[in-house]
Image: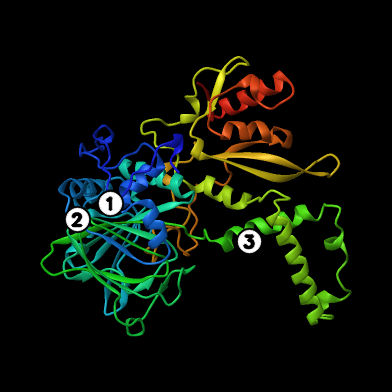
């Protein structure tokens, strides 16, 4: 639901004129940036969110034909062919920032050169039917930063992007499927899309597929400027620029990579099992049979015993006996997501305003960029293990490094691929701070989002209340209302 009780825009509602602003190029924006919900609603309009998530999300493609000149003009302002010359002057490199490729009869050829991208050579390759795949344009384009930052807040997951510029009568990539949910925005020209039934529904990997094995298209679509196409991960697809169309430029927004129930369970379950071992029930602390690791006693009884133990853990989980601790997933999200959209400000953590005191009313800044996780911590003095509260945030993340931990090559997802090339100065530690477990109730009070007097924070001593507020304020996460 939208924050502050605002009703989400329905499918036939227009964004109020007072919300229509202009982007950095002076083009009126049809997007409403009030909340993450309104941005996503603007993206899929005129379809409403309830209809989208009930009928399409992870189920089937959605093609939205807009025929809206204003929207088409806005889409074009996000990225266009003419932007490449200025971007090349900023020192782009092949593979890291863009790929040059072409697909003929299902065979892909990568035409990258070594080192820096030369615009004259790039233009020459483009004129010879090559596709330009530009990685993560939100690093350079403020309006895409603005959109994707809000979408990451909406999904609670990373949102990457690629731009594809393809000349007429040409195709950049062979038929394939991706491991992400895909939103295609047609920015310039037209693109011919063919979609096929998944061979691996909701796939977890990128895979090229042979055209003779994928059957007939389930969707044969011409995307025009201002149109949108969504399809779930695993959907086999290919796209080409038709004859007679000078070129096509489209933006791929992608999300939900490794964000399944299975991924969440793989993160939560070991922590939950560890916590359950410390209860009064000794069943899971009883020693396993002798020599089981040596291959002995690997009988059906072992499987039955493990299944029984798993059922008892599941019962505890359903009763909510322990916290669901997904610290690794939260840490990865906090570390790699976009910072808040604040163009022109180098360090927004330094602009939190007045220092809080006991008599002040305070609230969190950038609440959607703060993640709280319970973690185990071992005492260096006596080795004892206790729970602590990690407060992680993305205020100091660098927009220029977003989704660039690995260089793209084959992937059509806009996210990380499997090339394994780490960015030299990618961040390695998640910004944030650690509080004692006793501070969790007070942190939850602040997370609720309502202004609260420092004096009412759930800590026993006034000095502890003020110290907590000061620590959060010094990190740029809290302000005096």
The residue closer to the viewer here, 224 or 251, is 224
Mark 2 and mark 1: Cα distance apart in space? 16 Å
On residue 231, the disc is none
- Residue 1, quarter of picture: top left
Specify whether 324 is left or right of 413.
right
Specify whether 403 is left or right of 263.
left
Labels 2 and 1: the sequence-earlier one: 1
The local crowd at label 1, few if under 14, some if 14 to 19, many if 20 or more residues have their Cα within 10 Å, is some
The image shows residue 363 at horizontal and vertical percentages of: 53, 27
Mark 3 and mark 1: Cα distance apart in space? 37 Å
- The image shows residue 188, relative to residue 307, as above or below, that is above
Residue at numbered disc 1: 46
The image shows residue 33 at horizontal and vertical percentages of: 34, 38
- Residue 243, quarter of picture: bottom left
Labels 3 and 2: the sequence-earlier one: 2
- The image shows residue 294, relative to residue 396, as above or below, that is below
Q: What element carries label 3?
A: helix
Contact between labelled residues 2 and 3, with CB atoms less than 8 Å apart? no
Q: Is mark 1 on a helix, strand or loop?
A: loop
Specify whether 62 is left or right of 435.
left
Residue at numbered disc 2: 225
Residue at numbered disc 3: 266
Labels 3 and 1: the sequence-earlier one: 1
Mark 3 and mark 2: Cα distance apart in space? 41 Å
Q: Residue at 50% of width from left, 39% of height from top?
A: 369
The image shows residue 392 at horizontal and vertical percentages of: 58, 40
């Amino acid at each position: 639901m939208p924050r502050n009780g605002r009703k989400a825009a329905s499918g036939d509602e227009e964004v109020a004129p007072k919300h229509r602003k202009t982007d950095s190029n002076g083009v009126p924006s049809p997007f409403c940036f009030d909340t993450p919900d309104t941005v996503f609603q603007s993206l899929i309009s005129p379809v409403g969110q309830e209809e989208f998530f009930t009928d399409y999300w992870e189920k089937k493609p959605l093609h939205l034909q807009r025929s809206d000149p204003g929207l088409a003009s806005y889409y074009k302002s996000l990225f266009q062919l003419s932007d490449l010359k200025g971007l090349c002057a900023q020192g782009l490199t092949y593979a890291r920032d863009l790929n040059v490729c072409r697909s003929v009869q299902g065979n892909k050829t990568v035409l990258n050169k070594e080192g820096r991208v030369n615009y004259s050579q790039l233009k020459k390759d483009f004129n010879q039917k090559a596709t330009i795949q530009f990685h993560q344009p939100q690093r350079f384009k403020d309006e895409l930063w603005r959109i994707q930052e809000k979408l990451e807040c909406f999904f609670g997951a990373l949102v990457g992007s690629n731009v594809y510029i393809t000349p007429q009568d040409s195709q950049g990539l062979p038929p394939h499927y991706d491991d992400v949910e895909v939103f295609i925005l047609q920015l310039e020209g037209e693109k011919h899309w063919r979609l096929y039934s998944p061979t691996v529904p909701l796939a977890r990997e990128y895979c090229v597929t042979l055209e003779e094995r994928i059957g007939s298209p389930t969707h044969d679509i011409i995307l025009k400027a201002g149109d949108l196409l969504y399809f779930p991960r695993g959907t086999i697809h290919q796209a080409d620029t038709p004859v007679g169309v000078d070129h096509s430029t489209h933006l791929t927004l992608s999300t939900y990579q490794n964000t399944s129930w299975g991924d969440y369970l793989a993160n939560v379950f070991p922590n939950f099992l560890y916590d359950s071992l410390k209860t009064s029930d000794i069943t899971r602390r009883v020693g396993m049979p002798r020599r089981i690791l040596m291959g002995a006693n690997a009988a059906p009884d072992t499987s039955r015993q493990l299944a029984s133990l798993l059922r008892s853990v599941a019962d505890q989980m359903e009763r909510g006996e322990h916290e669901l601790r997904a610290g690794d997933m939260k840490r990865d999200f906090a570390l790699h997501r976009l910072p808040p959209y604040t163009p022109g400000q180098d360090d927004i953590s330094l602009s939190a305003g007045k220092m809080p005191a006991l008599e002040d009313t305070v609230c969190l800044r950038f609440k959607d960029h703060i993640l709280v996780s319970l973690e185990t911590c071992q005492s260096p003095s006596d080795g004892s293990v206790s729970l602590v509260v990690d407060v992680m945030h993305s205020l100091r993340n660098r927009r220029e490094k977003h989704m660039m931990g690995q260089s793209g090559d084959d992937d059509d997802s806009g996210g990380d691929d499997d090339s394994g090339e780490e960015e030299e100065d990618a961040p390695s530690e998640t910004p944030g701070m650690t509080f004692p477990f006793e501070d969790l109730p007070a942190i939850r009070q602040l997370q609720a989002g309502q202004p609260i007097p420092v004096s009412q924070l759930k800590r026993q001593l006034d000095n502890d209340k003020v110290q907590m507020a000061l620590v959060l304020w010094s990190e740029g996460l809290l302000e005096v209302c």
